[in-house]
Image: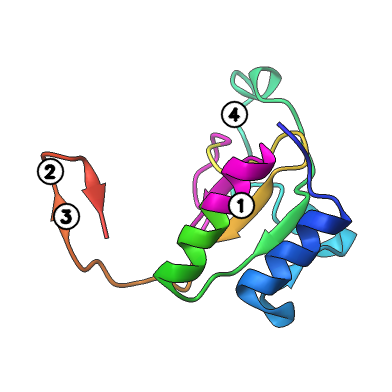
Amino acid sequence: MSAVNERIERSLVEICGEDRVRTDRRERKMYSFDIGAMPALVKPMVPAGLAGAVVRPVSEEQLVELVKLAQREGMSLVPRGWATSGYGGVLPRNGAAVVDLSGWQRVLAVDPQALTAT
């Protein structure tokens, strides 16, 4: 998987807007951890990583375009809500882009057959 580079960063900005994409080290580091301390038993199994970018899409269309970009570029996306787990589920590896979905607070539909939620 490829990490976020300048070309990909420009594409992220084109999709979500400059105010919705952060690549400064401080922000990327802040989004590279869960809110809780990882249990000592689990910690050795979860490699540390630094997010390549933090992206905050505001629409389904932007999210779809992010997924298309990631597929085209071979880039990993890590979806993140409130990061309240302490088990590493939202930790980026290899410069993955963290997709901050904490502002998405409405469930429109759940399809148990397809195992999807909108």
Magenta highlight on residue 92 = no
Please name whichever residue, 107 or 15, is drawn nearer the observer in this view of the structure. Answer: 15
Instruction: Residue at 87% x, 64% y: name it.
Output: 24
**Residues drawn in magenta:** 68-88
Please say if the residues under marks 2 and 3 sit with CB atoms less than 8 Å apart.
yes
Label 1 – label 3 distance at C-alpha: 26 Å
Please name whichever residue, 41 or 67, is drawn nearer the observer in this view of the structure. Answer: 67
Identify residue type, mark 1.
Leu
Query: On the image, numbered disc 2 is attached to which residue?
Result: 112
What x and y, as percent, mark residue 62?
51, 68
Which quadrant of the rendered structure holds the N terminus?
top right
Name the colour scheme: rainbow
Whether 34 is drawn above or below 40: the answer is below
Query: On the image, numbered disc 4 is attached to which residue?
Result: 39
Q: Quadrant of residue 44?
A: top right
What x and y, as percent, mark residue 104?
41, 71
Instruction: Please state if 89 lies on the left or on the right of 116 as rendered.
Output: right
Label 2 – label 4 distance at C-alpha: 32 Å
Mark 4 Cα-neighbour bin, 10 Å: few <14, some 14–19, many ≥20: few
Identify residue type, mark 2.
Pro
